[in-house]
Image: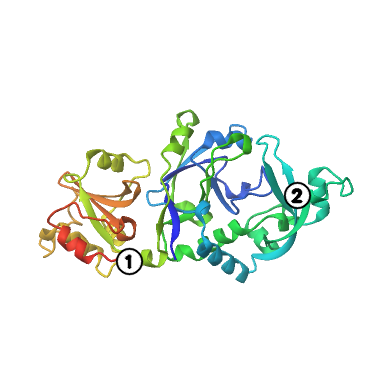
Amino acid sequence: MQVSVRHIPVVFHVGTMDAKNKGANYASSWEGDGLSVSVTPNIWDEIAKLGGAPVHQLACADAIFLDMTTVDADMWGAGTTYAMSKGLVDWAAVFVAREIDCETEQFRETCFATEAEAWEHLEMEVDQGFEDLVRSARRLTLTPAGAKRARFTGDALESAAGFIADDFAISFWAEDELRKHVPELVGCWWNERLDVDSLSAPRGVIFNDSLSRFDSSLADRTEVDDEDNIIELPDQFKIDPFVHQTAQFRFVTNCVSANGPDINDMIDSPASRDINYDEFVKLLGQGSSKSGLALLHQNFPEYENGALSLKKDHHVSYHVSTFKGLPALYLVHSGIEYVYQKSSFLGDGFQCADPYLAGEEISSLSF
């Protein structure tokens, strides 16, 4: 099975960062129990009527979001099977109200737990001759346990059966199961079209226990260009989570062989952060039969015999960032940046930029 993901290292949240305030403005959220984020904080402030609340920038260099707008049958099956096994969703009879959206002039459908709620929503009576506007259907819906996990409150908790639960099911599965295979996964992303009149814009959610991976800071909303952020939003790409789990880091390039702007973007990325030698070696060795140190020695054989030590060389620095739109590790040695990425991100056409390492790298890649 392959899943569609997006690497989005910088996102924004409008409002408070205190999870206790979840539901202060709305009794339910389509993003469930997590931190709602976007790349368009000013637009979402307008859509959600948040009154100019503070904007927080959240940056995580290796953040991967599950793309919820390209869900296929395999993802849907995995998510619904898992969520049903945990009693979080179930099939139920619902009543679907059909109406014209006065802003878009398009038909839209809303589900309710009872027929009376559907007619009340339409502000009509069942005997007014418009019986075809409400129909019964069988849909996957949240159970009481699922609604509580999604942090529904008040009246929304009581009527949770009206919430179609396909996305919730996949989100629950991603948070509980998919992350075991894709440790960089921090949340889910809905790449919806930008249409303020229809209350639509790209949006996402960060799982609560992934928030600690992000650097958070207050942002000046006047300096955030929502439209540019949408244009620059990374495309989705597919990974096999089971292959990714054991994928090895590979040396990709250095600043001598790479395009200068790509290296500059990596260094200047707002998601870039400094790490120490031990953290770098630990990350580099994840999923590899070789230790991170052995991988380093491919580039720096002079350190292999132990006479010299990278760890003790205080002129070498280590970093986590993004390179050409994907998570990366890099170190700076003698003023040269050396870039490493996971093989599962690189694709079948990967070619090592260093001619001295190309033969060894290509022959040892496993996808």
Give the residue displayed 46% in from the left and 62% down from the top: 179
Name the secondary structure under disc 2: strand
Q: Tell me the number on the disc at residue 156.
A: none
Residue 318 vs residue 59: left or right? left
Is residue 82 visible in the rendered image? The answer is yes
Number of residues whose C-alpha sits closer than 10 Å to that of mark 2, classed few (under 14), some (14–19) or many (20 or more)? many
Amino acid type of the residue that numbered disc 1 sits on in the rendered structure: Gly
Which residue occupies the extreme top position in the image?
222
Residue 74: image x %, image y %? 51, 65
Name the secondary structure under disc 1: loop
In what quadrant of the picture does the C terminus appear?
Answer: bottom left
Is residue 188 visible in the rendered image? The answer is no
Residue 282: image x %, image y %? 30, 61
Q: Tell me the number on the disc at residue 287.
A: 1
Calculate the distance from the C-alpha at mark 2 to the C-alpha at mark 1: 50 Å
Amino acid type of the residue that numbered disc 2 sits on in the rendered structure: Ala
Give the residue displayed 67% in from the left and 66% down from the top: 90
Give the residue displayed 18% in from the left and 55% down from the top: 312
Does label 2 or label 1 sit earlier along the sequence? 2
Q: Which residue is mark 2?
A: 97
